[in-house]
Amino acid sequence: MKEKILIEIYNYLFPILFNDREYDLIKTLKESSYSEANNQYMTKSIFLVIKCENLRDAYCAHKKYSQQLKSADAIYKFENKKIYLIEFKSGAVKGENILKKGESVFNILEDLKFFDDKKYLSYIVVYNPKDIPIESSELEDITDIIIDFSIDTQENYKDYKNKELHDISSLEEKFFHEAYFCTKDDFNKYIVKEFEEEEK
């Protein structure tokens, strides 16, 4: 994110959430993509983002919730108010959990008045097909993604957006302008490119 956007977000959130507590809110996209289970990063991008899990922690502490809410991994806000909520998944992709995370993050940001309208929000779930276990019940769906959605053609530039898997597009009806899965490679090819254009 551009520095001025980060400053705006921090200045807005600080008096609401932080008080005397200190949360490490700003991370690189690379740091946010790290999987402890697989000891790997899903992107090398060092653009700055809001670490969504830390924002969630601050929010839950502020609300005095005894139980943690679900969260995505990163928030990237563009200068034009567009916001990407990004969830990095390595290993099995559990559809119900993905949908709950999207709804939970939406509710947190809505309560914080973090966005003006859901038309600015997109929920992106990034996965690596190579990390999907053979025994995973989602393997057939993942194979469909590889065949149907990872074909790079000039005519179908947006084919990397898979809205079919686990009915993720159902989140668009109530919460997001767009909600979709994309592979790790497509994320680094298309989405990171958007960040590069934003920060020129």
Image (spheres, rainbow, N blue to C red):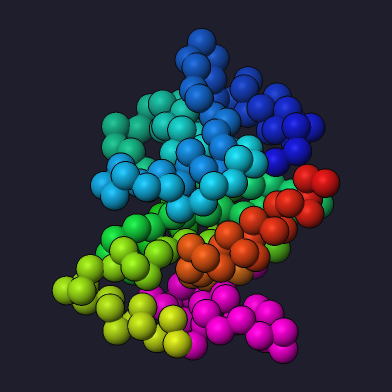
Give the quarter of the image for residue 130: bottom left
Tell me if residue 134 comes above or below residue 74 in the rendering: below
Residue ID at (56%, 68%): 186
Residue 96 visible in the snapshot: no
**Horizontal and vertical percent for residue 109?**
57, 45
Residue ID at (41%, 26%): 61
Q: Nearer the viewer, residue 124 or 36?
A: 36
Give the quarter of the image for residue 5: top right
What span is in magenta?
A: 148-177
Residue ID at (70%, 52%): 195
**Horizontal and vertical percent for residue 86?**
52, 54
Q: Nearer the viewer, residue 130 or 116?
A: 130
Tell me if residue 8 comes above or below residue 87 in the rendering: above
Would residue 167 be counted in the magenta stretch? yes
- Kindly give the residue lying farthest to the left in the view shown: 135
Q: Is residue 10 left or right of residue 79?
A: left
> Which image quadrant: the N terminus?
top right
